[in-house]
Structures are given as structure tokens and as C-alpha cells.
Image (cartoon, grey):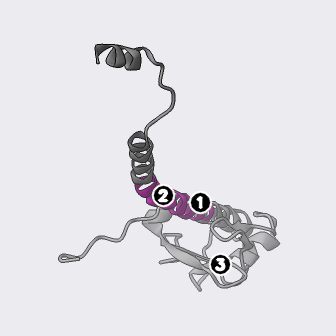
Amino acid sequence: MQAAILKRLNKEEKGFTLIELLAVIVILAVIAAIAIPLIGNIINKSKSDSDVATARQIYDASRMYVTSELNNVYPESKSITLGEIQGKGYLDKELLLPSTKNKLDGTKTVITYSDTVGTLTSVTLKDSTDKGDTYLASEVLKGKKESPTPTPGS
């Protein structure tokens, strides 16, 4: 009997047992279940951040437009369209909304001011399919979209 045990110990066994393989599969499944939603959130956040950066670019171009073309007098309508800015060459005519990769609509993309001295209210980005969002002054100036504050009980 001792010979059989010694023979078995000296025998080189190669490969993994079924339990070891199942344990590895379970570990990989748990990692995937955690990682996939996180990756999705990262992608959505980067799209949103790209849109805010585009809004900031449009806002900065509107300020240059007002300074150069309107002698630093903001319009009475308190808004400027992307088309006006593009028409004077302050931005490329083929400006895309990063989140959708569609061309921004020159009439629906609007920079809104609260007064005629140039206090920014918001920047509304709309693409050719009418998708987009409105970014508040604080978001445009900070460079990131503000998260909605959770309501109590939600």
C-alpha cells in the first residue's frame, strides 16, 4: 500500500482540475460584472465632458466675435447663434457635437447672455438631428457638467 502512495506522489500530474477551472471562470465573471458598468459610465462622462468643452469653445468664440465685430456691445436679443460666429470665421463651419459626431446646427446652437454687458447664462448645443443639451454658465466656465443633486429618498 505504501508503494502505491509513493508511486502516486512521484507521478507528475499535469493540468487543472475542474474545480480550479470553475473557480477561475467565476472570478472572471465577477470582475466582468463590476467592470462593464464602470466602463460604460466612463464613456458617457467623457462624451459629456467633450460636449462641455465644445460649449466653452463656442462661448469663447462668441466673446471674440462681440469684441471684434460688435465693438464689445452685446446684442439686445441677449443671444448669439453659432451661425453668426461661423459666418465671420471665428469657428469652423463643420463643428461637430462630440457625443453624437453630428454637425452642430448653426441656428439652434445659441449662446445666451443675461444682460447686454456679456454675463453668460447658458450655451445650448443642438446637432443636425436636434440632439444636444443646454449647459449653464457655471458648467461652461468650470468645464464640466454638474451632476444632478439627488433628492431625498431617491
Q: Nearer the viewer, residue 73 or 60?
A: 60
Assign the N terminus to one quadrant of the image: top left
Q: Residue at x 42, y 47 (%)?
A: 22
Say what amino acid the circle numbered 3 marks.
Thr
Q: Which residue is mark 1?
A: 50
Locate residue 135 relative to residue 96 in the image: left or right: left
Asked which quadrant contains residue 111, the reply is bottom right
- The CA span between labels 1 and 2 is 21 Å
Reading the chain from its start, which is encountered first: label 1 or label 2?
2
User: Of discs 3 and 2, which sits in the foreground?
Assistant: 2
| Residue 70 picture location, percent across and down | 70, 71
Q: Which residue is mark 2?
A: 36
- The CA span between labels 3 and 1 is 16 Å
Q: Residues within 10 Å of mark 1 (few under 14, many from 20)?
A: some
- The CA span between labels 3 and 2 is 34 Å
Q: Residue furthest left?
A: 153
Q: Nearer the viewer, residue 131 or 6?
A: 6
Q: Residues within 10 Å of mark 2 (few under 14, many from 20)?
A: few
Tell me if residue 121 comes above or below residue 91 in the rendering.
below
Badge number at residue 109: 3
The residue segment tinted magenta is: 32-54
Say what amino acid the circle numbered 2 marks.
Ile
| Residue 62 picture location, percent across and down | 65, 67
